[in-house]
């Protein structure tokens, strides 16, 4: 398995993000919220968006890196053909294990986790 994500696995265009917000279903748990929509691709894409008042830029980038790593680790268990926007709401000091538990619980709740 690859040790990094490819550029294709990240949603980059504003129109694609807006499409997920408009057409997708939302699921929330604790401090994370997912918007999930089908795409016509053979792979899944995602983006992590911390809210504006989430700490400073260092803390926002840190949570992005943590969630990207969780996505990378679990990408073989996530169904293909979806777009996912992950919004982080509350700035809390959570450990990586706690974040992973919430992340996987939300994937299972949304029905895109096959693990």
Image (cartoon, rainbow, N blue to C red):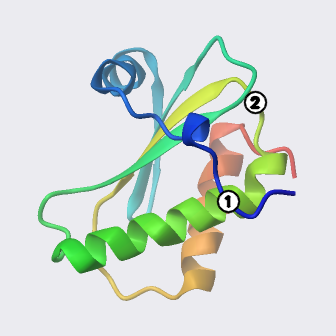
Most foreground residue, 103 or 43? 43
Q: Dot 1 corresponds to which residue? A: 4
Q: Dot 2 corresponds to which residue? A: 80
Identify the element where label 1 is drawn.
loop
> Residues at badges 1 and 2 in contact (C-beta under 8 Å)?
no
Q: In this view, does 33 lie to the left or right of 115?
A: left
Q: In this view, does 16 lie to the left or right of 76?
A: left
Instruction: Tell me where residue 45 sits by quadrant.
Output: top right
Can residue 32 be seen here? yes
Circle nearer the viewer, 1 or 2: 1
The residue shown at (42%, 58%) is 32
Coordinates of residue 38 in the picture (x, y in percent): 60, 18
Most foreground residue, 11 or 107? 11
Task: Looking at this view, name the residue that lies furthest to the left.
Answer: 53
Most foreground residue, 47 or 25? 47
Residue 113, relative to residue 55: is it above or below? above
Instruction: Tell me where residue 56 sits by quadrant.
Output: bottom left
Instruction: Tell me where residue 74 sits by quadrant.
Output: bottom right
Coordinates of residue 79 in the picture (x, y in percent): 78, 34
């Amino acid at each position: 398995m690859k040790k990094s994500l490819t550029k294709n696995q990240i949603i980059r265009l504003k129109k694609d993000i807006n499409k997920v917000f408009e057409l997708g279903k939302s699921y929330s748990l604790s401090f994370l919220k997912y918007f999930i929509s089908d795409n016509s691709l053979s792979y899944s894409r995602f983006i992590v968006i911390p809210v504006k008042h989430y700490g400073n830029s260092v803390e926002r980038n840190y949570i992005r890196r943590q969630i990207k790593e969780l996505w990378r680790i679990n990408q073989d268990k996530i169904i293909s053909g979806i777009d996912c926007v992950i919004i982080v709401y509350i700035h809390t000091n959570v450990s990586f294990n706690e974040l992973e538990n919430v992340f996987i619980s939300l994937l299972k709740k949304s029905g895109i986790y096959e693990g």
